Image: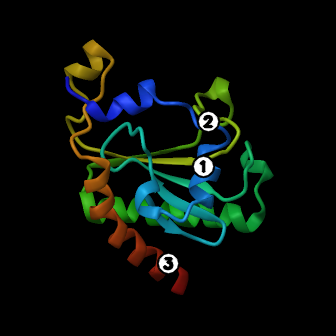
Amino acid sequence: MWAPWRIGYVTGDRPSGCVFCAKIDANEDDHSFVLYRGEHSLIVLNTYPYNSGHLMVVPNQHVADVTDLSAQALAELWELTGVAVRALKEALAPHGVNIGMNLGEAAGAGISDHLHMHIVPRWHGDTNFMTSCAETRVVPQSLEDSYRQLRPVVQRLALQSQQT
């Protein structure tokens, strides 16, 4: 298996502070793979995806638990989750979609202090012997290609969602 993009993660310095807050504060959406910015949340590609097109909805509010979100932020988190699902279905035509949120390290949260919703497109056959035998996932599309394919669809659907 050849995955040269992983070397930055393996050998790179870990950023100080919250990676999600850094994306929220940055003005480089293309570099941060931010697909859409709402008033209370953003839609972003997962930089270390489980599958091609793995999206996340991240609230701007730095909280660890969904019960700590404001009503407006919680409503937008779900609205943008719907936008993300519609965008994935339109742009990538998956056979299914996993949606989930892990609250707390014991629940599997890799970043437990800033909650986020995962939206993962799934296709028949997207798990194969690599996952079963080598605990390795094959992600066939680059982040850059996923970003270029998804951004215009997410932008259009998010704007339509705001108008309804």
In the image: residue 154, left or right of residue 59 = left
Q: Which mark is residue 45?
A: none
Q: Residue at x 60, y 36 (%)?
A: 102
Q: Residue at x 42, y 25 (%)?
A: 10
**Whether residue 89 is situated above or below residue 122 in the rendered picture:** below
Percent position (x, y) of residue 142? 26, 46
The residue to which callout 2 is attached is 111
Percent position (x, y) of residue 118? 50, 46
Colouring used for the render: rainbow
Residue 25 appearing in the image: yes
The residue to which callout 3 is attached is 161
Circles 2 and 1: CB atoms closer than 8 Å: yes
Q: Which secondary structure lies at badge 1? A: helix
The local crowd at label 2, few if under 14, some if 14 to 19, many if 20 or more residues have their Cα within 10 Å, is some
The amino acid on which the numbered mark 1 sits, given as a three-letter code, is: Phe
Mark 2–mark 1 distance (CA, rounded to whole Å): 9 Å
**Whether residue 69 is situated above or below residue 158 in the rendered picture:** above
Point out the image quarter for the N terminus.
top left
The residue to which callout 1 is attached is 20
